Image (cartoon, helix red, strand yellow):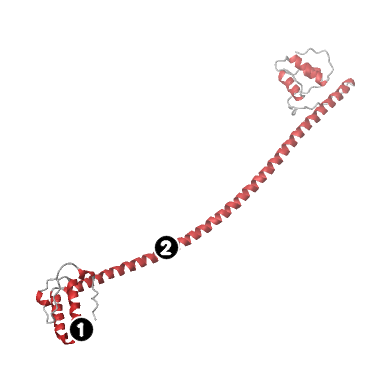
Amino acid sequence: MSASPRNLPEEEHSSSELEISDTAFENDLNIQGPPNKKRRSILEYENTVVESISSAGERVGSGFKALIKVEKAKSSAGFNRSILAELQKMNGTMGKMQGSLDTLTTNYNTLDKKVDKLNASHNTLNKKVDKLNASHSTLNKKVDNLNASHSTLNKKVDTLTADVGTLKNDMVDVKSLMFYVRVAENARRFERNERPLPVPFIRGEKDPLLPDVEDENDIQRLNTTQVKSYLDGYDIAYRAEEERRHLKSKLRKALRLPHLGVEYD
């Protein structure tokens, strides 16, 4: 039965030859030495010797002597030391790899913790965004309510403005009616030689500094500005370039004052 080749590091199969004497391969088993002194060839030679020992019990002594010679030669040539150095180198490499693996594990654990913190921060941020969205939605509703209130207020203001306009028109109508009633009443009073009643303005209010007008002589004493103030107040049309005497005549006729023969200037 043949022995399995020994499992050694890859470096043992190198193409370089060991410095071993040919006498190391001389034996009493009539086994030819290796074709060269490369590691693989030497290992194959040793396997051949082992197989020879297994198949011929009486040649055990000679076989072991042959193996011992080769092992001594290999030892002298640094074969075992080379293997030991390679093993130590491999151990060192494995140690470094283990250190790197430990560092990688530590870094992974640190990264995992950072990812957990990042996820927590992300969740917190999501909650804040949700609150902000809720606040924004509430604000939008308040703005909508405010716009609705503003629209309602505008409608009320428009209605009030229309009511005020209507009221003003009504007031003008009332004042116009009062004007004609007072003028008619004063005409009756003039016939009875009674003092006339004040005639209210139709447009605006009478200036307290504006002289009262009860007869034709009062109209004669008015200046141009005062006459125009009366005409504007009683809503009597006139031209800007119209002469003052014509303006005074319009005022007298509007108030239906008796004509006393006064010539207006």
Q: Say which of 260 and 242 sits in front.
A: 242
Badge 2 is on which residue? 114
Disc 1 versus disc 2: distance between alpha carbons? 67 Å
Question: Which x, y percent locates residue 15?
Answer: 18, 67
Q: In the rendered picture of this protein, how many numbered marks are placed on residues?
A: 2
Q: Residue at the location (58% across, 53% down)?
A: 135
| Element on which disc 2 rests | helix
Q: Can see residue 220?
A: no
Q: Residue at the location (60% across, 49% down)?
A: 140
Q: Residue at the location (77% across, 31% down)?
A: 169
Res 55 label: 1
Q: Name the image quarter holding residue 96.
A: bottom left
Question: Which x, y percent locates residue 97?
Answer: 30, 68
Q: Say which of 254 and 217 sits in front.
A: 254
Q: Can see residue 23?
A: yes
Question: Which x, y percent locates residue 199?
Answer: 81, 26
Q: Name the image quarter holding residue 78.
A: bottom left
- Residue that lies at the very extreme toward the bottom in this rendered image: 58
Quadrant occupied by the C terminus: top right
Disc 1 and disc 2 in contact, CB within 8 angstroms: no
Res 96 label: none
